[in-house]
Image: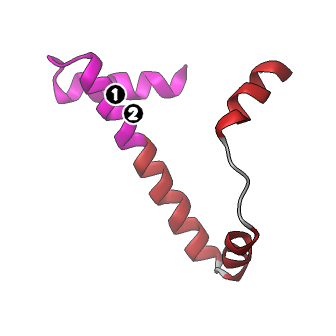
Amino acid sequence: MSATSSRQSNAYVEPLDPRQIAIYRRMTGEQLLRIGFEMCDAVRELTLAGIRYRHPGASEAETRRLLRQSYEA
């Protein structure tokens, strides 16, 4: 990724509030891991929704194939 595209992709990321950082620092590794898994699940569901929108006639198997393909790209 070029420096320009990196800056552009970060243009919509707001810095964490110091209070949120303090909350994360008090969490256990297990709690942080759970949050990470939940975020991955949310991203996967959003990606699946996008695939279903772009391919309304796709079977569930085809949708999952397209999901796997998106991870390889």
* Residue at point 49%, 58% (across, down): 37
In the image: residue 69, left or right of residue 10: left
Magenta stretch bounds? 44-73
Quadrant in which residue 68 is drawn? top left
In the image: residue 38, left or right of residue 6: left
What amino acid is labelled 1 in the image? Answer: Gly
In the image: residue 53, left or right of residue 45: left
Quadrant in which residue 6 is drawn? top right
What amino acid is labelled 2 in the image? Answer: Thr
- In the rendering, which numbered label is found on residue 50? 1
* Residue at point 35%, 42% (across, down): 45
Quadrant in which residue 5 is drawn? top right
Verify CB contact (< 8 Å) between mark 1 and mark 2: yes
Please name the residue that numbered disc 2 is placed on: 47
Q: Is residue 2 visible?
A: no
Q: Neighbour class for label 1 at 10 Å: few (<14), some, many (≥20)?
A: some
User: Taking 55 as reference, is 16 above or below it?
Assistant: below
Q: How many marks?
A: 2
